Image (spheres, rainbow, N blue to C red):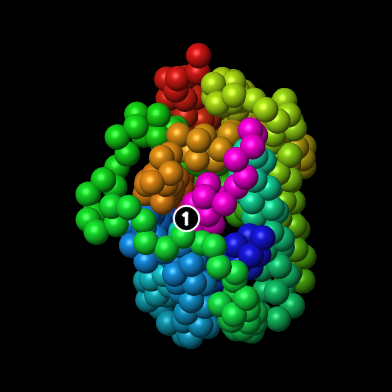
Amino acid sequence: MAVTAAYWAFMLSDGALRMLVLLHFNGLGFSPVQLAWLFVLYEVAGIVTNLAAGWLAARFGLAATLYAGLVLQIAALAALAQLDPEWTIAASVVFVMAVQGVSGVAKDLSKMSSKSAVKLLAPAQEGALFRWVAVLTGSKNAVKGAGFFLGAALLATAGFQAAVWAMAAVLALILAAVVLFLPEGLPGRMKGADTWAGWRSTDPRVNRLSLARLFLFGARDVWFVVGIPIYFQAVLSDGTAEGRREAFFLVGGFMALWIIGYGAVQAFAPALLGGKGQSEAAITRKAILWAGLLVPIPLLLAIAAALSGGPADWLTALLVVGLLVFGFVFALNSAVHSYLILAFGAADRITRDVGFYYMANAAGRLLGTVLSGVSYQFGGVPLCLATAGLMAAASWLIARKLPHL
């Protein structure tokens, strides 16, 4: 519970920060590609951090990496508050990229610590690991979704700098509480922590699942990061200051609803997928099934967007409904992946297996982030969604190779 509370606090600030940056800089006239660049280092940092974080946790203990993640997020927020609106676009992009890179390191230190702790602290009863993973991951995403709305609301009401400072102050209080009151029990130094060797798992199941995860999250972020939020802001705002403020709430509200719904589905995934007591092979078969069900959703939406010939009320409504359906199926995919990596991972090297898996997750987000800006700039919503469909298909084809007998 203590680990989950710390993770909640972090993810609330993470979601709010992403929406603040996206909407603030879109309002300053940044192009879709420039907006994508703002998040590139965040994802690159995730790739590197996840590989290093597993070793760091094995070397110094999970509590140390959890604290480090919170400290770095506070530092990133304090740095972002120094942004000067008089800077050139190039200087602003470089500065925000660097700050987002620090935030990316912070996120993945916190995530790896929290997910690894579940493997080591969950009860030994059959089905307990799946339930605990679902609760942690689902609640985390619901909180992050609330952060999306919080970020948009703070931008509309308090302004960029005041919002950033407020989040830094609250997160500092959370850090102090966690340091003072976190109970004993998180593992310290682990076996094999003296060397960097072994960062890549020798278990082909872990490696294959990690590759499927890469394309799964690429399929989401290729529309989620830049394309759809900017499309919605364009069609919902009339160009006036009041219209932009109203669009901030609407876009932030949709993104929050999507993430909260995604988190709720993840939290109830064990029940939705057949209840407790399922074998590892049974859950793997369901991972393959739901990966296949995800593929046609973005492809059908892409066809509809292409046929519309441009923004239209019916298309906007269809995108809202279609992307919520995508979120439901995606959440079940993500939940079974989160269980399988802990089921496949060896207890004596769990932080490194989880770190490698989330390195692949970050690589998929990086790929999706870059393609989100590029595809939207050159092909609009249809190309964004078609690219998402192709990446979902790649994830399904890879998942089919997982052992499921």
State the predominant SS element of the stretch in magenta. helix
Tell me: residue 148, above or below residue 203. below
Residue 211 horizontal side relative to residue 274, left or right: left
Q: Position of residue 363 (x, y in %)?
A: 39, 47
Which residue does the image show at 51% across and 61% down from the upper left?
186
Tell me: residue 182, above or below residue 135. below
Classed neighbour count for the residue bearing mark 1: other residues with Cα under 10 Å, few (<14), some (14–19), many (≥20): many
Residue 45 shows in this picture:
no
Displayed quadrant of residue 278: top right
Residue 116 shows in this picture:
yes
Which residue does the image show at 22% across and 49% down from the upper left?
197
Report the front residue among 112 and 186: 186
Q: Is residue 65 magenta?
A: no
Which residue does the image show at 32% across and 39% down from the upper left?
201
Please report the bounds of the magenta region as a residue range. Answer: 110-127
Q: Position of residue 340 (x, y in %)?
A: 52, 34
Amino acid type, residue under disc 1 in the picture: Met
Which residue does the image show at 64% across and 37% down from the upper left?
125
Q: In which quadrant will I find the N terminus?
A: bottom right
Displayed quadrant of residue 291: top right
Q: Position of residue 189 (x, y in %)?
A: 37, 61
Report the front residue among 178 and 333: 178
Q: Is residue 113 magenta?
A: yes
Secondary structure of the residue carrying numbered label 1: helix
The residue under label 1 is 112
Tell me: residue 289, above or below residue 90. above
Q: How many marks?
A: 1
Q: Position of residue 331 (x, y in %)?
A: 64, 38
Displayed quadrant of residue 19: bottom right
Residue 165 horizontal side relative to residue 93, left or right: right
